[in-house]
């Protein structure tokens, strides 16, 4: 679905505005102009969707997450009147066939991190605002990845393919309008509000779609005969201030006219983990190892560019029935070398397949490195007989130091000629290189300087 949106360029250093600054008359009388490059991505029925993803036999059935209080419900459950935060007893009364599952917050956090990592493949300007939603500013990405509508489609496809979840995306000229657009797009949809059509898009929508208008605000506005955003926009600012006070009245008036000057404020550039994943048939051991080597190369390159290294390596596998399994190892010392990461990941993946595959195919593999530290100066290992048996994953061993020198040479060549200039023969021979949009952008912005 494509509708119409607009955004004014923000001069000077970007910063998060207070609500008072938001509702202040910061825009001229003509509103804002520009491209619909602000996106709001919102996972659909997040907690419940993770449970259904991990238990495919529940697809199509009404499912809720919670216990005494419902935290989330699938759209099948919502169609029968189940919603958060009603009690579990009330939910079962409305939907006798409801499947209620206890929450698994560690799984939701992992899924959220995977989604946010996927969003950052399209732009570094990502602002998470909760565990299941984020704003993106794709202004700097359109010349490489296409217009916002195409980026929105690519986001939805990537999250579906690599994380196994549905995500709705709204694109507009302001944050508040992008958020409304994603709400209109649900479930599992995409809405772009074209510049110049904001008023027509907003007019028929319920006032409850406005950011900050809850049930109490809706009831009070209804007392004045206002049910839609278009009706609210026809009320003067002075009148709204008289009804609701200066702060709330001006807030309602500005949002009804799409006046929202807030920029997308990206989270800090130093993440707590670095990871990559590859979708495709990795059932055969040679395909799986080639995929893991390619992922280790991507993760190691990103770590070394940031002068970081990590002690814990996690491998996750998705089987052909869409179930997942993961395994981690914590090393005595931090590593960032491609071969070291690959050997650790391959050992984890092989053990996981031996224990859990049971004849099932493998459709996705991923590597993540966390417990990050600033990359230390290399200290030679004191052989005390402890630690992993493979010297490649023992920080400071003679083998590890040689691998570190080799990666340094590769990184220097890539810094000068671009990342695609030096590739692993095994990866090139067995699998085409899989580059994320962010990596493609980095490669186009040559030379790429380590640590930038």
Image (tube, rainbow, N blue to C red):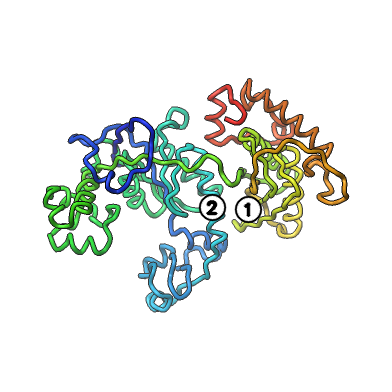
Q: Which mark is residue 31?
A: none
Question: Which residue is pictured at 37% across the width and 53% down the height?
Answer: 186
Q: Secondary structure at mark 2?
A: loop
The answer to whether residue 204 shows anywhere in this view is no
Q: Earlier in the sequence, mark 1 or mark 2?
A: 2
Q: Nearer the viewer, residue 240 or 209?
A: 240
Give residue 91's position: percent from left, percent from top.
40, 74
Question: How far apart are labels 1 and 2 at the CA level?
Answer: 10 Å
- Which corner quadrant holds the C terminus? top right
- Side (left or right) of 435 relative to 244: right
Q: Nearer the viewer, residue 213 or 82?
A: 213
Give residue 278's position: percent from left, percent from top.
62, 43
Give the residue number, with chain letter if any, for mark 1. 318
Is the residue marked by circle 2 packed among few (<14), some (14-19), or many (20+) residues within 10 Å? many
Mark 1 vs 2: CB contact within 8 A: yes
Q: Nearer the viewer, residue 153 or 103?
A: 103
Q: Which mark is residue 164?
A: 2
Question: Which residue is pictured at 69% across the width and 29% down the height?
Answer: 423
| Relative to 388, residue 107 above or below | below
| Relative to 320, residue 338 above or below | above
Give residue 40's position: percent from left, percent from top.
39, 46
Question: Which residue is pictured at 42% across the width and 36% down the height?
Answer: 138
* Picture quadrant of residue 21: top left
- Side (left or right) of 209 relative to 414: left
| Relative to 178, residue 81 above or below | below
Q: Secondary structure at mark 1?
A: strand
- Which corner quadrant holds the N terminus? top left
- Side (left or right) of 273 relative to 2: right
- Side (left or right) of 446 relative to 194: right
């Amino acid at each position: 679905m494509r509708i119409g949106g607009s955004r004014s360029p923000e001069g000077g250093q970007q910063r998060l505005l207070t609500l008072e600054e938001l509702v202040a008359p910061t825009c001229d009388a003509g509103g804002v102009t520009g491209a619909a490059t602000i996106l709001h991505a919102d996972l659909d029925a997040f907690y419940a969707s993770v449970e259904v993803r991990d238990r495919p036999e529940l697809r199509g059935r009404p499912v809720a997450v919670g216990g005494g209080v419902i935290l989330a419900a699938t759209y099948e459950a919502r169609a029968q009147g189940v919603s958060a935060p009603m009690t579990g007893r009330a939910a079962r009364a409305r939907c006798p066939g409801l499947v209620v599952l206890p929450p698994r917050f560690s799984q939701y956090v992992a899924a959220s991190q995977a989604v946010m990592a996927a969003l950052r493949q399209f732009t570094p300007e990502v602002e998470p605002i909760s565990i299941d939603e984020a704003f993106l500013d794709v202004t700097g990405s359109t010349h490489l990845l296409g217009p916002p509508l195409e980026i929105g489609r690519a986001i939805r496809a990537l999250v579906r393919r690599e994380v196994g979840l549905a995500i709705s995306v709204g694109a507009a000229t302001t944050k508040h309008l992008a958020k409304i657009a994603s709400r209109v797009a649900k479930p599992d949809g995409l809405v772009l509000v074209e510049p110049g059509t904001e008023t027509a898009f907003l007019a028929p929508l319920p006032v409850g779609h406005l950011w900050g208008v809850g049930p109490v605000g809706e009831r009070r506005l209804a007392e004045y005969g206002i049910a839609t955003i278009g009706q609210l926009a026809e009320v003067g600012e002075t009148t709204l201030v008289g009804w609701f006070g200066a702060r709330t009245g001006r807030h309602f008036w500005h949002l009804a006219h799409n006046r929202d000057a807030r920029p997308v404020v990206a989270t800090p550039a130093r993440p707590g983990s670095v990871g990559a994943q590859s979708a495709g048939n990795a059932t055969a051991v040679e395909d799986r190892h080639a995929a893991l080597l390619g992922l280790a190369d991507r993760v190691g390159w990103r770590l070394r560019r940031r002068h970081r290294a990590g002690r814990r390596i996690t491998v996750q596998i998705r089987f052909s029935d869409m179930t997942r399994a993961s395994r981690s190892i914590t090393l005595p010392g931090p590593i960032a070398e491609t071969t070291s990461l690959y050997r650790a990941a391959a050992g984890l993946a092989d053990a996981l397949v031996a224990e859990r595959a049971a004849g099932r195919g493998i459709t996705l593999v991923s590597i993540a490195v966390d417990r990050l530290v600033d990359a230390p100066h290399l200290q030679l290992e004191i052989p005390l007989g402890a630690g992993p048996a493979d010297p490649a994953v023992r920080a400071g061993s003679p083998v590890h130091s040689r691998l570190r020198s080799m990666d340094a040479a590769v990184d220097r060549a890539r810094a000068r000629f671009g990342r695609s200039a030096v590739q692993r023969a095994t990866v090139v021979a067995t699998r085409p290189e899989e580059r994320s949009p962010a990596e493609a952008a980095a490669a186009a912005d040559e030379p790429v300087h380590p640590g930038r």
